[in-house]
Structure formats: C-alpha cells, structure tokens
Amino acid sequence: MTTATPSLRRRVTLSVLSVFALLLVVVAIVVDVALGAQLRRDLDARLADRSARAVVLAEAGASAPELVAELQGQDIRVRVRTPDGVTYGDRGLGPSVGPKPLPPGRHPHGPAPRPPAPTSTVVHRTLPDGSRLTLVADTTAITEVHRQLRWVLLGAGLAAVLLAAALLVATIGRALGPLDRLTALARRITAGDRGQRLRPDRAGTELGRAADAFDRMLDALEAAETRAQSAATRAQRAEADTRQFLADAAHELRTPLAGIHATAEQLATAPDTNAEPRQQRRAALLMRETARASRLVTDMLDMARIDAGLELRIEPTNLGTLIDGEIDRTRLLAPQLSVQRTGLPQLVAPVDPTRICQILSNLLDNARRHTPAGGHITIDLARVLDRAEITVTDSGPGIPSTDRDRIFDRLVRLTQARDRDTGGAGLGLSIARGLARAHHGELTCLPHPHGARFQLTLPRCEPAPGCP
C-alpha cells in the first residue's frame, strides 16, 4: 500500500491562509453591511430631525420660503407646496416626488431646477398650516463612501493575506524544524552514523511521540543488526570449520583408501589357483568400491578447495588440444558411441589446463553415462567476441527445463533410483561449475530438444597462431 506524503509545509500554509482569507471576507462583509446600515440610519435621523423642525417652524408661523431656507442644505433638498398650489424650494425634484407645474406668469421662488439625484431617500410630511413638505436626501455620498470602503477593505485584505503568508512561511519553517532534524538524522544514520538519536525533551507532543517512536525503531534495528551480524559471524565461522573439517577428513582418508585399493588390486590380480571364484569377485567388488570412495573423497576435497578459494595455475593453453585428448579418452571408454568434434581446431585462452580437463572430463563422463549405445556426442569449440565457448551435446534422454539449474547443486541426482556406481554422488557438475567460475567463466545447461547440452564459457581467449 502506498502512503500519501503531501508537503506538510505547503498544506498547513494553504489551509491557514484559506481560513484567514475566509475570515477576512466575512469581516469585510460584516463591516460593509454594518457601515451601510449605520449611514442609512444617520440619514434617516437627519431627515426625521428636519421634518420635526419644519413642524415646529410652521407652528411658529414661518412662511414657506423661510422653511426652505432653514431646512435645505447638507445634501438635503426641500420643497414646500402651499395649500393654494404654490411651490417653493427645489422645483426640479420631478413628478416622482409630486411637484405640480407653476401657474403661468408666476415667477419661481427658490433655486433653479436641477435633475434629481440618481439615488435618494424621500420623506413627505403635511405641516399644520396644510402645506405639503417634501424632503429628499441624496445618497450619492453614502454610495461613494461605501465604494471607497470596499476598495480599502480589499487592499487591506490582500496586504494582510500577503503578510500572513510571509509570517506563516517563517513560523511553519521554525515549527517544522524537528522534522528537518529527524530527516537529517535519518540521512546520517543511512551514511553509517548508527549511534545518533533524536531524544525528544517532551515525549507527549505530536513531534515528541514521532521522535520517540523513531528512536525506538532505531534501537530495535540496531539490536537486530547486531544479532544478525553476530549470527552471520557464527555462521561463517561454522562454515569455515566445516570446510576445514571436510578438507582435513578428505585428505586423511586418501591414504587409507589408497592402501585398501592397492590391497584389493593385489588380491584381484594375484595368481592364486586355490582362490575361489567368489573370493575373486569379492576382491574385484572391493576394488571398485574403493575406487568409488577415492573419487568421492577427491570430489569432497575439490569442493572444499573451491569454497576456500581455489588457486589456479593460469597459463596460455590451446583448448583444442585439451578437447582432443578428452575425446580420445571418451572413445576408448565408450566405443559404442560416436564422438565428434566441430568448430575451431585450435583456440588459446589463459586457463589452468588441469582444471579445464577436469571440467571436460566431467561433462563427457555425464554424456557417456546417459547416452544409449549407438548414440552420439558432439563437442564444439567456438569464439564469440573475446570469449571461448565449448559446447557438449549428447543424444541421451535430456534434462527437464525445471532441472537445468538445479543439477548444478551439490548432491543432486535427477534419477534417484539409478545405480550409485554409474550415477555418482552428485558433486561432479557442482565442481565443474565452481571450476568454471574460478576462471571467471560460466557453465550452463542449455535447452536442447534431443538430449542434453552444456556450454562452458571462458573469457579472454585469442586464436592460436595460424587459426582464424
């Protein structure tokens, strides 16, 4: 499962700025609405005050022109219509506020007509003398104040958001300092400084709990690594002891086995006319089993040497000559088989000739044992780039694809019921691959439809003089 790892710094900054911006918008709306309502209330109060003054003045006997002169001003326009239809004050208020046209020949009283305000608040009042009072308050100033206030709120909000962003970046960077220290510590530990720890001073906070859990994890990992190293050291020591024991045992067994083999051979070949045929067969069986035990001890010794790092005697060697010698040997041991040679006649490579002969002998012995009478074995020598490739192919039953790599394991015999004398102990191919890798080469089992095919690859070869 993949764990989401967004940027904590960016997420916290954007979240706080979003909340802060939302609060600023709410405050701006509240201020705008509240100020607008207060301005309207002030305007309504002024209109109500002028209306009350008009009633007081009318009761005191003030004339219509006097009323207009007293009430008009401060963005408030006044019109007074007497009961006889004469209009005083602002005659340009228009029909929307109810003025009537002046009688013909009557000179206007008051200022010249003006177009009505685009937005206004109108108050109508009937005075005690029957006159009709109209008060019109122009709200253009209030609208302009509103507009300016909104621009001020917008600019102040943007400035506040930018200032908050700068402060948040600095504050969050300081607040996330423990996480940066944790990251730096993890990198130092990765580089090899395993003794570092965070050691939080307050383990109850969020960062403290994370740092404490990180320290505990490091302690557990360090303890597990120590145990693993100790176990690996013990395993290596045990493996070295086992390898040394096998080498010593194999070396010590070679001498008594050689004596037993010599004694059995003397018993089998001694001209004793009184010996029974059964006794001679027993001596021959003893000689064969002794030879087999000697081969097994030799294989064990070779495996121990390979595991310990086999020392090779490298020298320029003609691989074609080694192959020809092993072919002659195979033809003598298996005259019922057809052994052929293909590819380059000669090819020189820096190898240990004794160990290469051991590999070829092992491969040809396997092919000889598993190829039925009348079958054929082919050995091909080729040069691919700077590598030498020796391929051994037989016409036997072949090797299943699932076992092509397993056959190189130690003590593996694909046919478990096969006679142990012909099947061997299962160390030959493992030894052969070990010898090939000691030469920085490789031994593999290739797929082949008719029989088994093994390929030995050796690096740094060059053609022999006179060969392509």
Image (cartoon, rainbow, N blue to C red):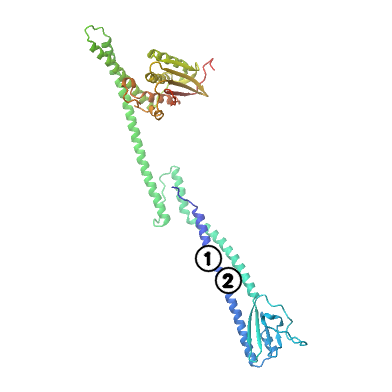
Mark 2 packing: few (<14 Cα in 10 Å), some, or many (20+)? some
Residue closer to the observer: 447 or 212: 447
Q: Is residue 265 left or right of residue 133?
A: left
Residue 32's disc number: 2
Residue closer to the observer: 220 or 411: 411
Percent position (x, y) of residue 409? Answer: 37, 28
Q: Where 124 sits versus 171, above or below?
A: below
Q: Where 393 sits versus 158, above or below?
A: above
Percent position (x, y) of residue 228? Answer: 36, 39
Whether residue 133 appears in this view of the structure is yes
Residue closer to the observer: 190 or 79: 79
SS under mark 1:
helix
SS under mark 2:
helix
Reading the image, the residue beneath label 1 is: 23
Whether residue 313 appears in this view of the structure is no
- The image quadrant that residue 44 belongs to is bottom right
Q: Amino acid at mark 1?
A: Leu
Q: Residue at x 54, y 61 (%)?
A: 164
